[in-house]
C-alpha cells in the first residue's frame, strides 16, 4: 500500500493536470464557436452563388462546362487522375479525430490508381510520409484559423492543375460535424462539380426546362464566362466551408476528450481521497496502538520494579528504615 505522502503527491499531480484539461476545454470551445460564426457569416453569399448557378443551368441545360461533370470527356472510361486533399489536425489530444480521417483516407487511396496526395495538418503529413506515401511537400498548410484567403490559395492551385489536365478530379477528405456530439468523416468531390447537385429532380419537376425562354434571360458576356466566375467562387466557398468544418470538428473532439479526461481525473481523485483517508486512519490507528502498547509496557515495567523492590524488602527488612 502506498504511503500517505505518495498518495498526497499523486492527488496534487492530478489536480494540476485537471487545470490544464479544463483550460484546454475552454480554449477549444471558444475556437469552435469563433470558426462556426465566421462560416455562418459567409453562408448567405455562397448560397447566393449556388442559386445563380442553378438558374444558369436551368436555362442552359445542354451547356457543357469545364467545372461541371456534364462534359462528354467526363463520361469516358479511363483511369482518372485524382487530387486527394486530406484535412487533419496539427496536434493530437483530440480523441479519435485524426485516426478516423487517416483510416478513411488510407482506404480511399487504395482505390485510386493515379493520384496526387495533399495533406493539410501536421499530424496527417507525418503519418503519410512515415508510411512511404508521396506527399506533395510544397503544400504546407495549417488547419488553425481557417480563412477565405487560405481557401482561395488552395482552390487556385487545384483549378490550375485541373485546367492544365494534370488532374481529372479533386476529392477532399475531412470530418463533418453533424451536431455537438456526432461527427463523421466525409469524402467530397470539389471538382468537377456534380450537375445533379444543382439540378435536382424535385427542381426539374417544378420547372419545365423545355418551356424556359433563353431570349429573356440575357447573360453578359456569355453563360459560359459567367458560370466560370461564379463556379470558381463557389468552389472557394466549398473549400472554406470544408476547412472550417474540419477545424470545428477537431476542436469539438478536443473538447469531448478534455471533458472526458477531467471526469476521469475527478473519479481518480475520489478514489485516491478514500485511499488517502484509509491510509491516514490506519496510520492514526497504528500510532494509537503504539502509544497504548508503550503505556502497557511502561506499566508492566513499573509493576515489575515494584515487585522486585518488595522482594528485596522481604529479604532485607533493615532496608525499610
Image (tube, rainbow, N blue to C red):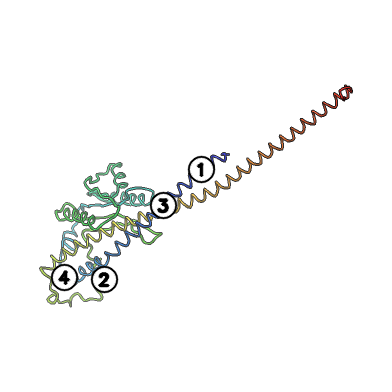
The mark that comes first in sequence, 4 or 3, is 3
| Dot placed on the residue nearer the N-terminal end, 3 or 2 | 3
Q: Which image quadrant for residue 65? A: bottom left
Name the quadrant containing residue 146. bottom left
Disc 4 + disc 3, Cβ < 8 Å: no
| Disc number for residue 201 | 2
Question: What whole-number distance in Å separates the C-alpha atoms at marks 3 and 2?
Answer: 49 Å
Q: Which mark is residue 60?
A: 4
3D distance between C-alphas at marks 3 and 1:
20 Å
Question: Relative to the observer, which residue lies in front, 106 or 150?
Answer: 150
Q: Secondary structure at mark 1?
A: helix
CB under 8 Å between discs 3 and 2: no
- Marks 1 and 2, Cα distance to the nearest angstrom? 63 Å
Residue 274 in percent (x, y) is at 58, 47
In this figure, which residue is indicated by the disc labeled 1?
Answer: 10
Q: How many residues crowd around disc 2 within 10 Å: few (fewer than 14), some, or many (20 or more)?
A: few
On the picture, is 119 further left or further right than 250? Answer: left
- At horizontal 39% and vertical 53% (from top left) the residue drawn is 254
Numbered circle sitting on residue 84: none
Q: Earlier in the sequence, mark 2 or mark 4?
A: 4
Q: Secondary structure at mark 3?
A: helix
Label 1 Cα neighbours within 10 Å, binned few <14 / some 14-19 / many ≥20: some
- Dot 2: element: helix
In the picture, the quarter occupied by the N terminus is: top right
Q: Which residue is mark 3?
A: 23
Cα separation, mark 1 vs mark 4, equals 71 Å
User: How far across and down, in percent of the image, does residue 6 sit?
Assistant: 53, 39
Rendered location of residue 66, percent (x, y):
16, 60
Circles 2 and 4: CB atoms closer than 8 Å: no
Question: In which quadrant of the rendered view does residue 61 lie?
Answer: bottom left
Disc 2/disc 4 C-alpha distance (Å): 16 Å
Amino acid at each position: 500500500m502506498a504511503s500517505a505522502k505518495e498518495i498526497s503527491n499523486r492527488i496534487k499531480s492530478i489536480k494540476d493536470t485537471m487545470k490544464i484539461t479544463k483550460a484546454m476545454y475552454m480554449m477549444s470551445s471558444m475556437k469552435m464557436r469563433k470558426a462556426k460564426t465566421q462560416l455562418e457569416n459567409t453562408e448567405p453569399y455562397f448560397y447566393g452563388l449556388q442559386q445563380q448557378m442553378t438558374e444558369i443551368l436551368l436555362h442552359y441545360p445542354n451547356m457543357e462546362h469545364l467545372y461541371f461533370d456534364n462534359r462528354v470527356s467526363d463520361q469516358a472510361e479511363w483511369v482518372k487522375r485524382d487530387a486527394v486533399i486530406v484535412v487533419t489536425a496539427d496536434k493530437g489530444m483530440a480523441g479519435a479525430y485524426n485516426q478516423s480521417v487517416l483510416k478513411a483516407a488510407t482506404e480511399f487511396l487504395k482505390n485510386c490508381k493515379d493520384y496526387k496526395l495533399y495533406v493539410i495538418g501536421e499530424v496527417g503529413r507525418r503519418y503519410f510520409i512515415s508510411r512511404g506515401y508521396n506527399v506533395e511537400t510544397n503544400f504546407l498548410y495549417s488547419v488553425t484559423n481557417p480563412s477565405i484567403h487560405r481557401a482561395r490559395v488552395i482552390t487556385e492551385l487545384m483549378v490550375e492543375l485541373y485546367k492544365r489536365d494534370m488532374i481529372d478530379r479533386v476529392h477532399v477528405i475531412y470530418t463533418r460535424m453533424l451536431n455537438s456530439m456526432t461527427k463523421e468523416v466525409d469524402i467530397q468531390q470539389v471538382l468537377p462539380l456534380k450537375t445533379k447537385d444543382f439540378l435536382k429532380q424535385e427542381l426539374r419537376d417544378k420547372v419545365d426546362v423545355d418551356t424556359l425562354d433563353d431570349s429573356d434571360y440575357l447573360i453578359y458576356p456569355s453563360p459560359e464566362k459567367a458560370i466560370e466566375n461564379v463556379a470558381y467562387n463557389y468552389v472557394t466557398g466549398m473549400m472554406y466551408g470544408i476547412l472550417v468544418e474540419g477545424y470545428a470538428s477537431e476542436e469539438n473532439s478536443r473538447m469531448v476528450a478534455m471533458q472526458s479526461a477531467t471526469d476521469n481525473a475527478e473519479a481518480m481523485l475520489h478514489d485516491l481521497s478514500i485511499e488517502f483517508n484509509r491510509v491516514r486512519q490506519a496510520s492514526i490507528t497504528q500510532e494509537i496502538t503504539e502509544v497504548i502498547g508503550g503505556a502497557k509496557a511502561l506499566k508492566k515495567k513499573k509493576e515489575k520494579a515494584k515487585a522486585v523492590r518488595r522482594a528485596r524488602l522481604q529479604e532485607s527488612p533493615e532496608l525499610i528504615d
